[in-house]
Image: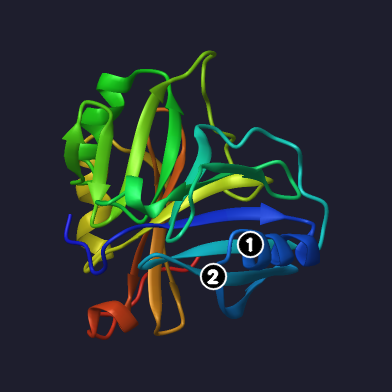
Amino acid sequence: MQFAREGFDLGLFSNQRDAQLAFWQEEVGLTYDHMGKLGGGMQQHRHHLGSAILKMNHARDPLEGVGSGGYRRLRVAVSGLEHLRRLQDPDGNTVELVPARTASDWDYGLVMAVNDVARHGRFLSDALGLQRVDADTFACGRARLWLEQAAAPVRSADDWRGPGYRYITFQIRDARAALPAALAAGALPGEPLRDMGDLVRFGFIRDPDGNWIELSERTTFTGVPLGGSVQTA
């Protein structure tokens, strides 16, 4: 898979817009970028997270309380911090602020609880092309995915829109090539490709535990216009 940008975005959904914005900006210290409209009463509030974006998606209508799967803890390296701080956002999502001096080779990452560490590691290497750092750590630039054995079976809900940490996004150069290649390498189908105007082409795959992964081809990263069009969902 050819990445158009290092790292990965993290998407979460919430009904608590103001409290969430205050938490991510004031408690975690992320810089606000802009708001985009997703339709259906949803707004995406984008914050800089290392080289990538934290997407705080605010839903106007109540979100169904279904499990978010294996995305468990976000870790953010913070300069000048002396000791680990563990926080929870207004919906109970866990964030760990880590002293940057102890995280010299990464800027942020996500701890995942998985059903089978070895199997999941093969998926991250083969289907996504992530770099293996050690048996349970995988890198995309200065972002990390850390795998840990789940205490109970993990299965993400069959919708990427719901409360909690919900999906990650990789920016890629060619969505039409990357999505079928990932499926051939063992990814589970998620949602087909669609175009959002002439700016972005995106679709979803799922990992062995059903967690949602967005593959996004965005012209601002590739510098290349979208070729043709795909049928919109």
Residue 51 figure quarter: bottom left
Residue 100 figure quarter: bottom left
Q: Are marks 1 and 2 in contact (CB under 8 Å)?
A: yes
Quarter of the figure that contains the N terminus? bottom left
Using the image, determine if residue 220 lies above or below residue 195: below
Badge 1 marks a residue whose secondary structure is: helix
Q: Residue at x 71, y 41 (%)?
A: 92
Q: Indicate left or right for 220 with 76 as reference.
A: left
Using the image, determine if residue 61 lies above or below residue 190: below
Badge 2 marks a residue whose secondary structure is: strand
Q: Amino acid at mark 2?
A: His
Q: Nearer the viewer, residue 200 or 8?
A: 8
Q: Indicate left or right for 47 with 124 as reference.
A: right
- Residue 37 at x, y = what percent? 64, 76
Q: Which residue is mark 1?
A: 24
Q: Nearer the viewer, residue 88 or 224?
A: 88
Counting the numbered discs, the total is: 2
Q: Amino acid at mark 1?
A: Trp
Q: Which residue is mark 2?
A: 47
Question: From mark 1 to mark 2, how far is it between C-alphas?
Answer: 8 Å
